[in-house]
Amino acid sequence: MLHPHLRTLAEALHGHAALVRRRARGDAGYTTETVVVTALLAVLAITVVGIIVAKVVGKAHSIDLG
């Protein structure tokens, strides 16, 4: 037979573990959503940098040095 304090602690840990399991099941799609949004933001950033580089290089080539 467990000491009353140990029994209370065991029940609290059991309850907390059950809560963690329920929350883990509820957030199953969050990781996928995060990956998709991050990938879209990365593609957008690469596109913007490409546009800026093209404009800067185009402007640099139009400068008359002679």
Image: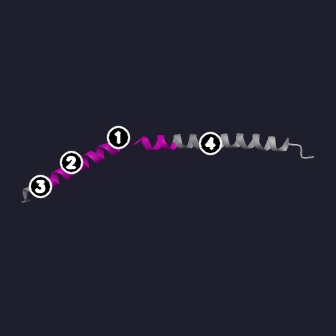
Q: Is residue 7 magenta?
A: no
Nearer mark to the viewer, of 4 and 1: 4
Q: Which residue is mark 2?
A: 15
**Front residue of this view, candidates 66 and 54:** 66
Q: Which residue is mark 3?
A: 7
Quadrant of residue 44 within the rendered picture: top right
Secondary-structure class at tag 1: helix
**Which is nearer the N-term, disc 3 or disc 2?**
3
Q: Which residues are magenta?
A: 8-35
Q: How many marks?
A: 4
Tag 3: Cα neighbours inside 10 Å, few (<14), some, or many (≥20)? few
Nearer mark to the viewer, of 3 and 4: 4
Distance between the alpha carbons at the discs numbered 4 and 1: 31 Å
Predominant secondary structure, magenta span = helix
Tag 2: Cα neighbours inside 10 Å, few (<14), some, or many (≥20)? few
**Which is nearer the N-term, disc 2 or disc 4?**
2
Q: Is residue 26 above or below residue 9?
A: above
Q: Which residue is mark 1?
A: 26
